[in-house]
Image (cartoon, rainbow, N blue to C red):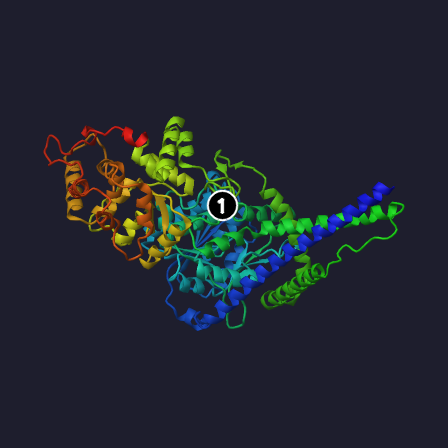
Amino acid sequence: MTNAVLLLWDSWSILGRVVTLIAIAILVLGLENLAIKLIADIQGWRRRGSEPTVEMLRRKQEDCTAILIPITQSAPLAGTMLARIKRTLEYENYTIFVGARSIDTQAVAAIRREARIDSRVQLCLFEEHEAQSQAHALNALLASVRQFEHLHDVDFRTYFLQGPESIVHPLSLKLANWHCEFASVVQLPVLTNPRDSMSMTGGAGFDDLGEHRARETVLRARVVRNVPVRQTGVALRRDAIWALKLHGDVFDCRSESPVFDAVQRLGERGYLATFVWQRDDDKAVIAVEELSPRALRDAVQDRAQRLSATALSGWRPIGSAHGSLWTHYFNYRDRRIVAVAATLACAVLAGLAAGALLLAGRLTPGFESIPALIESPWVLALLAIDAALLGAALIERLVQTARTRGLRNAALLPLNLAASCLITARAVVLASRPQQKADRTGVALTGSPAATHSVFAATPRLTDILVRSGAMSKDEAKIAHGYSRRTGRNLLLALQDLRLVDGAAIARALGEKLGIEFGHLDGPLDSYASVFLSRHAAERFCAFAQRAEDGGIDVYVGEDYSAREWRALRAALQRAGVHRPHFRTAPLSEIAYAIRFAGTAQEMAIEQAIAVSLMDGPILEGTGRNIRRQLRAPYRRLEDLLVERGLIRPRRLRLMRSRLGAEGQALADTICKDRRIPPFTLAETVREFNEWRPAIAPLTAAAPMARHSSRTTLPPDPRLAA
């Protein structure tokens, strides 16, 4: 019995420490939530009066808008929804495109009845292969919209996505029409209304874009310009649809959340998204209201689908260079539910453990009195603060729900929150399972087509990626590492110095390491190319920014930077007016070539020569892009030439680069003034660098282009590898 009593005492003391840790975690989460709300309130107070009034929304000229309503399941309320839109919507210049399955006779009959009454309602029948998923239906609906545009000679400026069982506010299109002038994606608030049969599977406790997260989402739209979206209540501008179409289907058929994935791709390309929260003259929120899922299983599946797209869609390191601090913070906020779920699970387990220990103490002889679980005053103070924060949060949500939805929904809020916790817990378990579905065509459906990255995975080295891909052997990797350690040369530049791997393979490995895509700088660099970075900033970071075909701004990088250099590069881009860059990797030779020759008369002459060559007939190299890659591949920066010829130590070169300021002199000027380099050899190297020209011969009918393969390639320098 003595051992049992001692075990109970030790277990009780350990449980007290666990409760202390849980109290600290709840305090941290509560204070962090309070801080972001205070910041959002301060930002909202500073920007008060900047939003348009309802009268301004009504007076603004209406742009042509297409309302897209895909129906992939049974929708008995489709006719009622269409009649309500036509009766209540305060907008005239719109056309409704409703996509329905041909086998859904009831919905098709209701839509045709409404189409006969109003010509602005267009029915688009889906075949069986076109309604397999939401993405298939949306792509088929967009194809019908394009046919309508060609037939009636009309161009829709805005595409508004709406669900088959949703109600739009009369001023919804007016509000989207105003804000589409400022952003390519406009997300309206989405409020979930419970069904009569399942009142506990919907309501204020389930909305991600409802009143309780409105201030945070508005702040996110202002500082990050990218917000999470739903399948309904979102407006896409025409340029956003065109940018998505350039890269394939507008909505990816492999994704379970095609609209969310499309907006995420737009954000990566630099397109802006916003979230608007505004009330009308009657103080009602201008929002989209949708009905909750029909069954508990559907509610869990819908919640798991949203979690798979946000919280469990993979993790990129918070210290990455592809966003500001606000971006990294809201990246954490999207995944905050994981920490909250873990904390609540630990709290529930601690409560169950306390009950089990109390019951065991009652049944164990000799364990007459039970000591206090918490004796430290500061832990009791933590628990009191936690209780105060939870109570204040509940009261705040009750007030917000009463203002937005009414007193009846506010009275049901505690029950909705309890149901939401249970559904979310089940959804987290369901979404965290490594499952992969397939549609009827056999195409795999995943939460996101992008590759995921584990937070606990170590960053791979370039040589590991190259060895795994077969671009180099392990012995060559050891040679590169030895040269890098011995000279202090960056590993990427060491691979270039030793010429163990070609530049394209190195850039692909760098893209895999950084989690960004690879691309060639093989387009024309004449005077029509949009160049954003200054010559000094481009040479300092060896980065080249130019306008892409879809309207975004691609920033090509050829080296891996430290966190400080990434921040300096982003600051230089912001000074150049590039606030949403899309980073890509490219061969270092192509980037350096573009920095030096972009917009020059020589480059325009080369473009003219390539054009004449291609018009003369097919040549061995193929297209103009292949020719440009071959011409730019052998180019080297002056600093790389000096290192390859042994005229400067890599450590000293790195020190000289670190001392360059934002507006200081160029690195080449600093190197040329260095007295430690032999002057005659330096002058000869500089002269060769200045006189370097791409290997292109005068144009003749027999040989329109000098073959790059005819140039003698230098073997690896044994002095560098020794």
x, y percent for residue 520 = 30, 40
Q: State left or right for residue 464 relative to residue 406.
A: left
Q: Amino acid at mark 1?
A: Gln
Badge 1 element: helix
| Along the viewing direction, whichever of 468 and 442 lies nearer the viewer | 468
User: Residue beneath label 1, please?
Assistant: 134
Compared with residue 81, is residue 641 higher up or lower down, i.e. above or below? above
Residue depicted at x 49% and y 45%: 134
Determine whether 277 is above or below 518 in the image: below
Residue occupying the far front of the picture: 676
Asked if residue 52 is positioned above or below residue 463 in the image, the reply reads below
Q: Quadrant of residue 485?
A: top left
**In the shown orientation, is residue 680 left or right of residue 213?**
left
Residue at image point 59% right, 49% down: 338
Where's the N terminus, which quadrant? top right
Tell me: residue 54, above or below residue 21: below
Q: Position of residue 124 (x, y in %)?
A: 44, 48
Residue 615 picture location, percent across and down: 16, 37
Q: Quadrant of the C terminus?
A: top left
Quadrant in the rendering for residue 682 = top left
Instruction: Give percent across and percent down for residue 619.
Output: 19, 31
Farthest right residue in view: 365
Q: Nearer the viewer, residue 252 or 517?
A: 517
Quadrant assignment, res 462 = top left
Q: Count the marks.
A: 1
Q: Nearer the viewer, residue 709 or 166?
A: 709
Q: Going by the image, does 68 lie left or right of 196? A: left
Q: Nearer the viewer, residue 529 or 195?
A: 529
Q: Residue at x 47, y 38 (%)?
A: 129
Whether residue 581 is visible to the viewer of this picture, yes or no, is yes
Tell me, yes or no, if residue 203 can be seen here.
no
